Amino acid sequence: MNCNAYFNAKLLLTAEYLVLNGAKALAVPLRFGQSIMVEENNNGFIFWQAIAYDGSVWFSGKYCLGDFSIKESSNVSIAVHPQKLLLAAKKLNPLFCDKSAGCNVITTLNYPLLWGLGSSSTLIAAIAFWAGIDPFQLHFNISKGSGYDIACAINNKPLVYSIRNKKPEIEIVEFMPSFHKKIFFVYQGNKQDTAEGITQFHNRNSQPDTIAIEKASSLTSQMLAASTLTDFENCLYEHEKLISNLIGLPSIKQGLFSDLPGEVKSLGAWGGDFCMLTWHDNPELLSSYLKSKGLETWFNFNDIVL
């Protein structure tokens, strides 16, 4: 089956870790993402190419039809991941690729892979689309993550995501604060393993208390309702304090951003990828401030959020 589709990258703004336990989380799809193009080629195998944002091929491989065994690849450890997804998709739809005589698969990222904005989730959504299956089913069959990133991949608006009775609940929301020009997302350059972060969290919090879950959900609502930058910053501060206490790590403001005149919040697994901060002064001064800390990549809210 030929297909051509595009799926959004994501950022989780609230309830990191706790979204797994039923907390309501605010997540935003981004102006970045990944596309998939599948075309029949009659060559008798699947020829896969993964294209980086700069146009280079960062992975290529050939997979057998039927059992999706790896014929050859540019990197065996990378080749296993698409194979795992293809096999999981086949379990959910036994007719997937059944009548194919071979195909070319091209996946293309429009942002650097190391940014950690959802290359895995957009690939899951892409393969689910190709296979004609539920992307959440595919996600939960191969991942321990909450699935909020799948929700962002297939929706073009900010959303509140939660898990109820082991099923995802998605509420599309409006989230464009009047002070959005003072909200920034900064890449810290430390790629984090989300699965590892989840495992560490559960090792420390086998049963997070309901008070923490309710607090996270409340902060999600407060962030959405914040009418002033001060209200928004109070949410960031309270949220950082909540998660810091749960995972036993100092907040990011206690470390790298101790001299920040605004507030800052970690996003996703703490310690890497992106953080969100507020900046009251001229954005050009923010650039100088971040460069003094060795940080070169940052975006205003409007530059990155769909």
Image: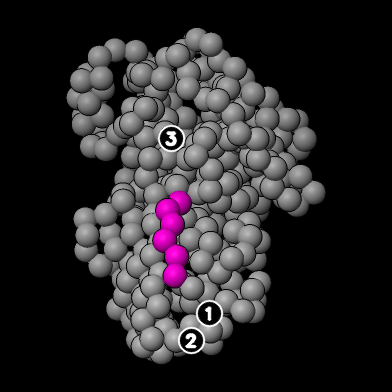
Residue 74's place in the image compared with 249, above or below, is below
For disc 2, the marked residue is 65
- 31, 229: nearer the viewer: 31
10 Å crowding of disc 2: few (<14), some (14-19), many (20+): some
The image's mark for residue 73 is none
Mark 3–mark 1 Cα distance, whole angstroms, equals 33 Å
**The C terminus sits in image quarter:** top left
For disc 1, the marked residue is 97
Mark 3–mark 2 Cα distance, whole angstroms, equals 37 Å
Q: Earlier in the sequence, mark 3 or mark 2?
A: 2
Residue 3 located within the stretch drawn in magenta:
yes
Whether the residues at callouts 3 and 2 have beta carbons within 8 Å, the answer is: no
10 Å crowding of disc 1: few (<14), some (14-19), many (20+): many
Q: Earlier in the sequence, mark 3 or mark 1?
A: 1
Pair 1/2: label in front = 1
What residue type is disc 1 on? Cys
- 240, 49: nearer the viewer: 49
For disc 3, the marked residue is 306
Mark 1–mark 2 Cα distance, whole angstroms, equals 7 Å
User: Which region is colored magenta?
Assistant: 2-7
Whether the residues at callouts 1 and 2 have beta carbons within 8 Å, the answer is: yes
Residue 188 at x, y percent in the picture:
34, 40
Residue 175's place in the image compared with 84, above or below, is above
Residue 22 at x, y percent in the picture:
72, 41
What residue type is disc 3 on? Leu
Residue 160 at x, y percent in the picture:
62, 34
